[in-house]
């Protein structure tokens, strides 16, 4: 990477009025366009420097704290890697040995574990109507204690997946698209099929499709959302997608046919999710501790899923995309028919051909998370990166 | 913070004959006055530097190891933050997957996990008569292996709460008092009420009241310990408190009335604990694995607690303190009446008004722990801090 | 340590054609002699620098990932310490909350957690025929994704104990022997008794004896393997031991008498293990989930062990070694008769006298692991160490 290229990118980053300093990253649709562009550009710079073996250690010390209210390997690792990239150590708040509940308890705990914390990453996607609220509660608790002078710095809360959005995933997706299509500007008019797909499991979060439609419409893409009847998403991101499409000159349509969505698509994102109504009932049953009700709901939901087994990304369907060569996207792990399951989201044939594409898509996530930390914790991220280049242009490996 | 102020503090730290190098911090009453002053001053310097965004990374590498034999969120975090502040990575010894017992096993394990370890933080407060003994055992094992040339450095053991004392808490408390009253010297003659308070739980450790009375009496405070009949503390810290009061010109009295303790108090510390005799019986029953006996003891103890529900820190009681404005202290989490429990240590009204005071009190803990590491692991802590200032006066954030 | 001594060692390291860059450390017998010598020399240099308080922080950032499929305190700690020594943060892949199975799942997960990973340490010793295979699978997955351009760097897989070998242990053992006997060259002709010993437990891995016989024979030692009838090792390391002895001018013999093995031995390594055939049956039963079969096998195996209770390292047996003063070796923890168990591998008398020897033996492990990381991740490890010396000759402690 030539140094002048880096300098140009840093200058470009400096010119963006991101407005992210001392804020949180909870919902991509609450960020400004400049904010999103700043995160993507910072992610690209961090990749460049890392590929060149240059240090991106911007913090001398400080902690990145994670709270996982759902299982996670990949995002847990990506958050840790992102923190490490910037010089932060990580700690995980284990809610089995420590209690984070709601209200005053959240306020107190968030402060107690915030004294030297720079970022708090939270995954809370199990309960529809709860995850985003909890993330907001942690953020406002930190903010209060910071303004009261109890905390020395205003740690950022980064949404590592909530019931509403999954911005670390979707911004990595957006970066992936930008790399493959030659830049954010080239996404204008490109057709993206965000479609439901069959899975033998139930209760998958809605955050990815919701985040994808509300993000890609901002960049002028022709976003088609496809799902069987009943598999509706939450209203807020749907409204956002419509509004963004109108503003950006993109399009947003909802159809009930996978084939229609795939027709002439430049990129396809076939992925299972649970219907919003199922997730709402599930939340109520979980709260009520109604095990019989949960078992009944699961049976009902799986039976309903099974009616749409033909919602599978196959070679025949891929053949209908633009030049039969659409980019296949997935946030992983995918339910691969004849692979991880008997019948699932995608045929083994398609998945095997596109495997490394999905790995590449995932590879952007640590850098996107690091960019979010950089953008929220540094008043002038461009200057911070520039300083690093000046001070320690040492290569990691001989 | 002006640089000359820092320089003065560093010079002041250098002038103290702390005698802590290559020792442990187990019981505050075994430390010299200079040792305690050195820890407080080092903590203050670390706060100053951190607030100024200056690096306090005194270790290039090395590990801080923690052993938690009781649940912990706050102290676990504080230890991790303290290690991180100085550049140490942390590891936690999980006794469920690894066995630390007694005797030779302790000696061997302490050595095996000590090869590159600079500090071992231990919480062991469940069994009266056991926690301090275990901490001593780990410390002497490390010492033996160091003297035998097996370990390259003599890691310090830091008591993160034992059955006898909780010095990381009480030194943070002392720093809090010093900040609010204008310095350690201004504590002379100030009245501190360390009182029992009602809690609907049972088996709370005695370490905080024991540590508080044995520490604050050293600085000339008028310490009043109040508890209902039977809620006695362990003899050793009581004797220490009496002796320190005699030496320092302070006072130490024990009363059986919360109201009497609060009268004209400058600071109040209402907090529940279990009677020493209950804790002794509990230890015996736990050792014997007598579940029925434990259940009976719990019922008996809770019934006895319930006789003293009026030991609650209320607005009326606070009104009896000096100018009705005593500092409310708590090590958190507090049992707040009408908040975390129906009836507890403190009324919601008092707690809500003093919430940020308790957060501030807690905020000193990471720095106090870091100061203990600094004081035990560096022959000349003042010189080490000074060197950091010379070498890397870089700000963390632009 | 005089600087010119370090310089000589660095020059010596530079002269070795180790061939380890961008490879893995899975089986010591697949490494070249130069590779083994390079790891030992690098370990020695890292010890020297650490003892002198000089920084060995060769990485600015990056992760060391560990996967433990069996309990571990010591190796877990040693891996973490090794990573920390070089500047890597660590993360542990918890397979209870995240699934690593076989096939495509391994390939995908290894990539997903590999984006900024420099080393993956794996312990997988429970299933005979599985552990090494799994380690190979992770290594080839990383290699594939690296070659496909998905991963920026080719993380090394380091075997932290498999069903076949335990190279981090045996190279630490070799370093211990070299230190005590005055260098690798002095090991020529020295007699090492690697013998089975009685233990009241069952199912201990075969990796240590297998690794020891296949490694020490390469350095011209007279290695005697002793075990009761039936306690056979896996064929591959036995063949390797024979071949290495032939090449190096050493000897390798198998006997069925502890006493014969001890006669005139310079070093003894009495340690229990399970017969290969028992381990094979155990693997089949575990796979089949046959609990009754496992219980029956355990009884049978323990009964069989009990026939050889006299395979205990006692003072009388030690008296038969060279000058009654052989070095007692153990990978720890040992089953000490009258100590950790009633009747075990070694008498309390012998163990107590040799305790610190075993601690010293263990002390080399963190440095050996760090040396493996250095040798696999740096094209020119000698230059990397030299650069560290030039750049930051700062002492950790004043």
Image (spheres, coloured by chain):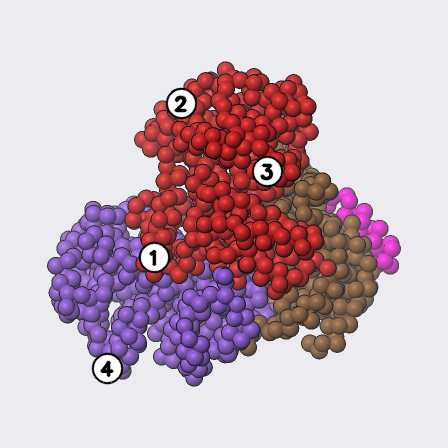
Chain colours: A purple, B brown, C red
Q: CA distance from mark 4 to mark 3?
A: 77 Å
Please give the residue where the numbered disc 4 appears in the rendered image: A249
Considering only order in the chain, which callout, 1 or 2, is on the residue closer to the N terminus?
A: 1
Q: Is residue A368 left or right of residue C311?
A: left
Dot 2: element: helix
Considering only order in the chain, which callout, 2 or 3, is on the residue closer to the N terminus?
A: 3
Q: CA distance from mark 2 to mark 1?
A: 45 Å
How crowded pointer 2 is (Cα within 10 Å; few <14, some 14-19, many 20+) is rated as: some
How crowded pointer 3 is (Cα within 10 Å; few <14, some 14-19, many 20+) is rated as: few
Residue B233 lies in the magenta stretch: yes
Q: CA distance from mark 3 to mark 2?
A: 44 Å
User: Which residue is farthest bottom?
Assistant: A15
Dot 4: element: loop
The subunit letter for the residue under badge 3 reads C
Residue B56 visible in the shown view = yes
Q: Which residues are magenta?
A: B230-259
Please give the residue where the numbered disc 1 appears in the rendered image: C147
User: Which residue is farthest top?
Assistant: C307
Q: How far across and down, in percent of the image, does residue A278 sit?
A: 26, 57
Q: Marks 1 and 3: which is nearer the front?
A: 3
Instruction: Relative to C373, say whether C316 is above or below.
Output: above
Residue B257 lies in the magenta stretch: yes
Dot 3: element: helix
Q: Marks 1 and 4: which is nearer the front?
A: 1
Instruction: Relative to B45, say whether C189 is above or below.
Output: above
Please give the residue where the numbered disc 2 appears in the rendered image: C297
Please give the residue where the numbered disc 3 appears in the rendered image: C185
């Amino acid at each position: 990477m030539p140094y002048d290229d880096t300098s140009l990118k840093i200058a470009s980053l400096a010119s963006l009025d991101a407005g992210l300093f001392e804020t949180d990253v909870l919902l991509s649709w609450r960020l400004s366009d400049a904010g999103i562009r700043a995160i993507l550009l910072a992610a690209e710079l961090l990749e460049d420097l890392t590929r060149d073996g240059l240090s991106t250690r911007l913090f001398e010390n400080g902690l990145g704290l994670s709270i996982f209210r759902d299982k996670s390997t990949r995002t847990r690792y990506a958050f840790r890697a992102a923190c490490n990239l910037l010089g932060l150590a990580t700690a995980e708040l284990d809610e089995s040995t420590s209690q984070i509940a709601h209200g005053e308890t959240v306020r107190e705990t968030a402060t107690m574990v915030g004294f030297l914390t720079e970022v708090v990453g939270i995954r809370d996607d199990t309960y529809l109507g709860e995850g985003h609220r909890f993330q907001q509660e942690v953020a406002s608790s930190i903010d209060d204690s910071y303004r009261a002078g109890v905390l020395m710095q205003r740690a950022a809360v980064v949404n590592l997946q909530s019931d509403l959005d999954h911005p670390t995933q979707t911004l990595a997706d957006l970066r992936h698209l930008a790399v493959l299509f030659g830049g954010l500007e080239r996404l204008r008019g490109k057709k993206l099929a965000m479609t439901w797909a069959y899975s033998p499991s139930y209760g998958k979060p809605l955050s990815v499709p919701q985040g994808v439609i509300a993000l890609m419409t901002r960049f002028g893409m022709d976003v088609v959302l496809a799902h069987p009847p009943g598999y509706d998403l939450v209203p807020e991101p749907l409204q956002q997608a419509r509004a963004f499409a109108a503003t950006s000159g993109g399009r947003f349509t909802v159809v009930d046919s996978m084939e229609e969505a795939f027709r002439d698509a430049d990129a396809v994102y076939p992925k299972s999710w649970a219907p919003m109504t199922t997730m709402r009932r599930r939340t109520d049953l979980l709260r009520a501790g109604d095990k019989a009700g949960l078992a009944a709901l699961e049976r009902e939901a799986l039976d309903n899923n099974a009616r749409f087994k033909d919602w599978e990304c196959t070679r025949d369907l891929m053949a209908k995309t633009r030049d039969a060569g659409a980019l296949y996207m997935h946030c992983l792990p995918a339910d691969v028919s004849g692979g991880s399951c008997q019948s699932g989201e995608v045929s083994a044939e398609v998945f095997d051909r596109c495997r490394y594409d999905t790995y590449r898509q995932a590879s952007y996530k640590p850098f996107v998370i690091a960019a979010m930390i950089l953008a929220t914790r540094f008043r002038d991220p461009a200057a911070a990166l520039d300083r690093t280049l000046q001070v320690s242009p040492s290569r990691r490996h001989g």
